[in-house]
Image (cartoon, helix red, strand yellow):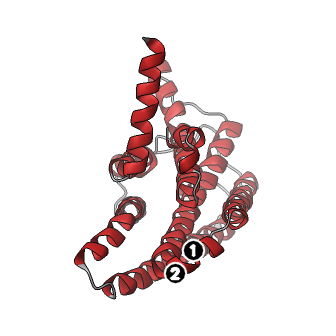
């Protein structure tokens, strides 16, 4: 919905809505990667998945979750420029830079997903594996391999630090600068307005990282597959579905544009 509204309304062709439309598109693809197969399993009462289907699901899941992380980091940088460097905003956030940031995010995510997929392909598995999950999650599949998984685990943990912890560090650094800039604003109304522009992004980042960290910490502490799967549903299904609502409810421009779209459709029907 965000993507369609941004395309249809020329006044929303700004960096913030450009990044937001990309995030919405990734969230749609993210949920489609796992939910479609889960619904098919429920409908057919069969939990079977082919080896090719498993690799494909791992590839797109890794790609989209990394792309989600990088887009949230790009949006944090955008907030930093808008609040900490308002006079240079138009000079810095040009169209080609925004496109370059999105392109780099896609390239990094595709290469990382391709690396993980190829490394899983190099593993050997026993017949008729039982994956204790509702989708082929990378860690779960690697743990079930019959061959040596040391290199896979090293790559997973190094990537988690570089491609997960690195962007989180960037987000925290951006917001430390943003908080310092907001504190320097003299009027209470100015402080509230500056902080309100970051509230949606902060909510989405907190929800995403808290849920994903909760899943991996719970899987490391407990071996209860049901609790791990329940937690995974929260960050693979619920969180991406909540993101558009979080941004829409706190964004007057999007609500006004959405209202105009509905009014136009109602007039066309009448």
In this figure, which residue is indicated by the disc labeled 2?
A: 85
Q: Tell me residue 120's x, y (percent).
A: 69, 54
For the residue carrying disc 1, how many other residues have a C-alpha within 10 Å: few (<14), some (14-19), or many (20+)?
A: some
Query: Could you tell whether 163 is left or right of 104 in the image?
Result: left
Query: Could you tell whether 239 is left or right of 13 in the image?
Result: left
Residue found at the far top of this picture: 270
Query: Could you tell whether 158 is left or right of 193 in the image?
Result: right
Q: Can residue 102 be seen in this view?
A: yes
Q: Tell me residue 254's x, y (percent).
A: 43, 46
The correct choice, above or below, for 266 with respect to 7 in the image is above
The residue that appears at 64% across and 75% down in the rendered structure is 92
Q: Tell me residue 58's x, y (percent).
A: 62, 48
The correct choice, above or below, for 38 with respect to 188 in the image is above
For the residue carrying disc 2, how many other residues have a C-alpha within 10 Å: few (<14), some (14-19), or many (20+)?
A: some
Query: Could you tell whether 139 is left or right of 247 in the image?
Result: right
The residue that appears at 65% across and 70% down in the rendered structure is 155
Q: Is residue 26 visible?
A: no
Q: Which of 145 and 193 is in front in this view?
A: 193
User: Gap between marks 1 and 2, in whole Å?
Assistant: 6 Å
Give the SS element for disc 2: loop
The correct choice, above or below, for 235 with respect to 128 in the image is below
The residue that appears at 58% across and 79% down in the rendered structure is 88
């Amino acid at each position: 919905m965000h993507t369609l509204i941004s395309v249809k309304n020329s006044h929303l062709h700004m960096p913030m809505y450009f990044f937001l439309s990309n995030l919405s598109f990734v969230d749609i693809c993210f949920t489609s990667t796992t939910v479609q197969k889960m619904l098919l399993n429920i409908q057919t009462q069969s939990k079977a998945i082919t080896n090719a289907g498993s690799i494909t699901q791992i590839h797109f899941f890794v790609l989209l979750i990394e792309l989600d992380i990088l887009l949230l980091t790009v949006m944090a940088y955008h907030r930093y420029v808008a609040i900490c460097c308002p006079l240079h905003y138009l000079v810095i956030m040009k169209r080609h830079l925004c496109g370059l940031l999105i392109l780099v995010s896609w390239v990094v995510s595709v290469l990382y997903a391709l690396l993980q997929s190829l490394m899983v392909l190099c593993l050997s598995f026993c017949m008729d594996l039982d994956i204790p999950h509702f989708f082929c999650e990378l860690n779960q599949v690697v743990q079930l391999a019959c061959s040596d998984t040391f290199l896979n685990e090293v790559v997973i943990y190094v990537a988690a630090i570089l491609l997960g912890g690195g962007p989180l560090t960037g987000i925290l650094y951006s917001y430390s600068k943003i908080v310092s800039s907001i504190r320097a604003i003299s009027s209470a109304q100015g402080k509230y307005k500056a902080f309100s522009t970051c509230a949606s992004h902060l909510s989405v980042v907190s929800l995403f990282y808290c849920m994903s960290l909760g899943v991996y910490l719970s899987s490391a502490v407990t071996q209860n597959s049901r609790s791990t799967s329940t937690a995974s549903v929260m960050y693979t299904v619920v969180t991406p579905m909540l993101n558009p609502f979080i941004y829409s409810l706190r964004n007057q421009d999007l609500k006004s544009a959405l209202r105009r779209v509905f009014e136009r459709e109602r007039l066309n029907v009448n």
